[in-house]
């Protein structure tokens, strides 16, 4: 609670901040908050984008073929898939859909990196974004800042894990996993896969996952942002971007002011109010720039 006000996490009944939400604050903080409150429905464009991601993912993603029943089962599944993917990265040169965790000023962060790729002996953080193949230059320009910030946050979290600034002990304490059981159905399913006994508990698989992530090659100071055509998954543009720690820290300081409760969610600026035309909340839950 800041200045007698509840934090945004408390108001929104959330335990952690997603990297995607934090980066979305650069696009429109008000839209991000309303999306959490009211939910984000799937548009045809979003559905096409999901198909593109699924096609790319199938090429290398190592999926645990057992469906989780509880939240603890889901945490196990993410850790197992992380460990399997990072292990294969050593031979394949890249892996997909890697969950990352961390803490910034006491706030719990989590996210899912689209791709990690080994280039010149270093691990490059890669994010894929799908856009229409028509008028793509404007589409990229509009969203570039928030997409770049998402990559910078991922890089920072991965650095913390790689360099043991955020490790298994931090995660176990934050998520309270020690001693928590998996559901009997899920446990029976993963046992049938022949997974070693020491990896059948949350503690075991997360220790293994963090060890694998700490053993990765050095994380590159260049991140990669790819814009893909949502119609055919072809690459529209591929940007190599230097990691900017100073800009990231300045942004996080401001962004966390919202999450701590120091200030309300800001609407998009008047200069960028054209973005409202793409927002499902415009003229309904949000009327900041609605014509009077």
Image: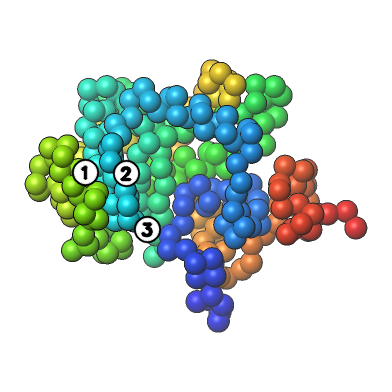
Residue under label 3, please give it.
Answer: 103
Front tag of 3 and 1: 1
Among all residues in the image, which is located at the extreme left?
A: 197
Mark 1 or mark 2: whose residue is earlier in sequence: 2
Query: Which element type, helix, strand or loop, lies under badge 1?
Result: helix
Horizontally, residue 187 falls left or right of residue 136, namely left
Can you give x and y, in whole percent of width and height, for residue 39 in the image? 59, 54
Residue under label 2, please give it.
Answer: 67
Mark 3 crowdedness (10 Å alpha carbons): few <14, some 14-19, many ≥20:
some
Query: Can you say whether 243 is above or below 53 in the image?
Result: below
Mark 2 or mark 3: whose residue is earlier in sequence: 2
Mark 3 or mark 1: whose residue is earlier in sequence: 3
Front position in the image: 256 or 208: 208
Q: Residue at x 64, y 66 (%)?
A: 264
Query: Can you say whether 108 is above or below 48 in the image?
Result: below
Query: Can you say whether 31 is above or below 277 in the image?
Result: below
Can you give x and y, in whole percent of width and height, for residue 227 in the image? 55, 27
Can you give x and y, in whole percent of width and height, for residue 135 in the image? 71, 24
Front position in the image: 28 or 285: 285
Is there CB contact under 8 Å for labels 3 and 1?
A: no
Is there CB contact under 8 Å for labels 1 and 2?
A: yes
Front tag of 2 and 3: 2
Front position in the image: 203 or 4: 203
Residue under label 1, please give it.
Answer: 189
> Can residue 233 be seen in the rendering of this structure?
yes
Horizontally, residue 121 falls left or right of residue 47, namely left
Can you give x and y, in whole percent of width and height, for residue 26 in the image? 61, 49
């Amino acid at each position: 609670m800041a200045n007698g006000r509840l934090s945004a996490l408390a108001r929104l009944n959330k335990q952690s901040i997603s990297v995607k939400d934090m980066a979305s604050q650069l696009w429109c903080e008000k839209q991000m908050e309303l999306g959490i409150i009211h939910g984000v429905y799937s548009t045809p464009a979003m559905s096409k984008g999901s198909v593109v991601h699924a096609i790319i993912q199938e090429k290398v993603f190592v999926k645990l073929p057992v469906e989780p029943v509880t939240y603890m089962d889901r945490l196990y599944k993410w850790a197992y898939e992380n460990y399997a993917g990072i292990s294969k990265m050593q031979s394949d040169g890249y892996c997909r859909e890697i969950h990352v965790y961390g803490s910034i000023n006491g706030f719990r962060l989590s996210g899912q990196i689209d791709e990690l790729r080994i280039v010149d002996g270093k691990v490059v953080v890669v994010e894929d974004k799908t856009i229409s193949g028509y008028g793509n230059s404007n589409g990229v320009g509009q969203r570039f800042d928030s997409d770049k910030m998402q990559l910078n946050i991922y890089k920072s979290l991965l650095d913390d894990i790689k360099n043991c600034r955020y490790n298994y002990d931090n995660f176990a304490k934050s998520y309270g996993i020690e001693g928590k059981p998996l559901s009997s159905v899920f446990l029976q399913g993963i046992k049938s896969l022949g997974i070693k006994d020491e990896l059948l508990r949350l503690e075991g698989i997360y220790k293994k996952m963090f060890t694998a992530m700490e053993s990765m090659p050095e994380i590159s100071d260049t991140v990669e942002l790819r814009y893909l055509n949502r119609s055919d998954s072809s690459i529209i543009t591929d940007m190599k971007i230097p990691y900017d720690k100073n800009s990231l820290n300045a942004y996080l300081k401001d962004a966390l002011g919202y999450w701590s409760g120091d200030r309300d969610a800001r609407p998009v600026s008047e200069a960028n109010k054209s973005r409202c035309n793409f927002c499902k909340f415009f003229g309904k839950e949000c009327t900041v720039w609605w014509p009077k």
